[in-house]
Amino acid sequence: MPPKRAASSSGSSANKKAKTPAHEPPKSKRWSKVSGSANADVDYKTIWENPDKWYSFITMCSLARPNYQDEDDEDDVNNENSEEGAGEGEAEGEANDEGQLGPKCGKKGCVCFKPAQRNPDHPWVISQAGYRKYCTQQIHVSLRDPDNFDMYTYNDHAGYGCLEVAQNLFLDYVEAAERGWREQWAVCEGFAVWLSNPASDALMRIDDSEAVENTMQLVGRMFLDMLARLDSQGLVGDATDVKSLGTIMAIYIHIVPGLREVGILDGDDEKAGNVFQPEHFDNAILSYANKRGVTLQGPKNIDEITANLTGDVELPGNGASDPWGWKAKLKKYEKRYAGSAPYTGRKKTSAIGGDALDITTWTSAERKAASFDHKDPLGKREIDALKQGMVMQLG
C-alpha cells in the first residue's frame, strides 16, 4: 500500500495527473470554482464509465497500519524499491503478466491488486473502486495540510482538514445512493481504510473533542445504514456478491478500541443489553456478523476484540425508513456544524464538508500571508493546471 506522499522541499513542486474522461462527470456544487479537491473528485468518478471493472474485488497484502497485519508480515518484506516496477497502466487497472492490476507492495508472494477469486482465503479484500476511493482521500488530506505548502495557519488546520474530508465522505455516501449499493459500498470501504491509517490521525487530535465524538458516532450509523441496506437485499453473509464484507466489517470494529483509548466512543454500555448505543456501534456490527453468518477477517486480533463484545444488539426489520437513525442524525449534524471553517473565517462551500480548508482554493494573498517566505507556494503553472482540471498530488 503506498504511503502518504510527502511534500517536497518546495511547496510549489508537485506531480500532476491529467484526468481524461470520455464523458466528464458533473462537478459537485460543494466545491469551489478552482479546487484540487474538485479535480480529485471528478477524477475518481471516471470509474463510473467502467463499473464492471471497478466494482470487482481484489486482494491486498494489507489494508491498514502495520499493527493490524499478521505478526510475521514484517519478516516477509523485501526491498520495497525492488518491486516497484509496475507502470501507470497497472495502477489504472490493467493486469500485468502475473494478473496483478496494480503495483506490488514488496512482500514475498505479494497478492496486492490480484482478483479476489484467485486467493479466496486471503483475509484482506476490497473492491477496486473502494481502494481508489481511499487513495482519493489521501489526496484530499494532503491538500489540507499547510506543512505540505510550507505554510502555517493554525495548529489544527490539518486536523480540521481531516474533519472536512470525513464530512465529504458522508455527503458522498448520500449522493451514491442513486447509483446503487455498489458505489455506496465503495464509499464505506474507502472510509474504513482511511480511518484505519495514519493519514486520519490528525482528526482525533483537534481541539473540539465533541465534534470528533459526534463525527465518529455518525460514521457508525452510516456503516450500519449500509449493512441494513445490504441486509434487505440478502447480501449480508459469506456467500454474497459483497466479497469484501468480512474485511470491511472487521476494520470498522477494529477502529473503535483505538478511539476509546483517546476518550472517543467510550460511553458506558453496561446496562445497554440488546439496545443499540451509538458509542458502541461496533457491537451492532458484530451483531450482523453473528446473526447473518459473516466471517470477520483481516486485522490479526479481531477475535480478541470481538471477545469483549456481546454481539446481540437487536437488528432492525426490513422496510424501516431509517433503521439506524443515520438520516435523522445527519440532518442534526449538518445544522450544528454549518457555517465558517474553524479559525479561518472562510465560508464553507456547503453545510458540511466542502473545500474551505483545501489550500488550493485559497487566494494567492491568503497563501502568501501564511507562507513561511511570504510567497505563494503555487506558481502560475500549478494554478493553471488546477484550472484545467488536473489532479495535484504532492510528491
Image: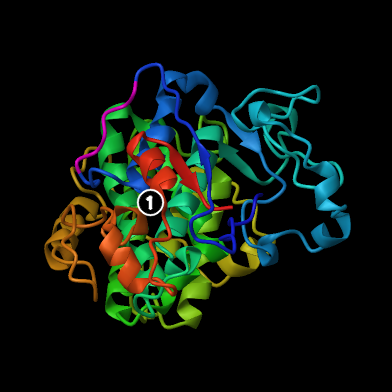
Provide the major secondary structure of the magenta segment: loop
367 above or below 105?
below
Residue 148 percent across, percent down from the top left: 49, 64
35 or 187, which is in the foreground?
A: 35
Residue 370 percent across, percent down from the top left: 35, 72
Q: Is residue 112 left or right of residue 227?
A: right
Magenta-highlighted residues: 24-29
Q: Residue at left 42%, top 34%?
A: 43
Is 26 colored magenta in this rendering? yes
Is 323 colored magenta in this rendering? no
Q: Disc 1 marks which residue?
A: 223
Q: Residue at left 36%, top 82%?
A: 268
Secondary element under disc 1, as helix, strand or loop, is helix
Crowding around mark 1 (Cα neighbors within 10 Å: few <14, some 14 to 19, many 20+) is many
Q: Residue at left 21%, top 57%?
A: 352
Q: Residue at left 34%, top 67%?
A: 368
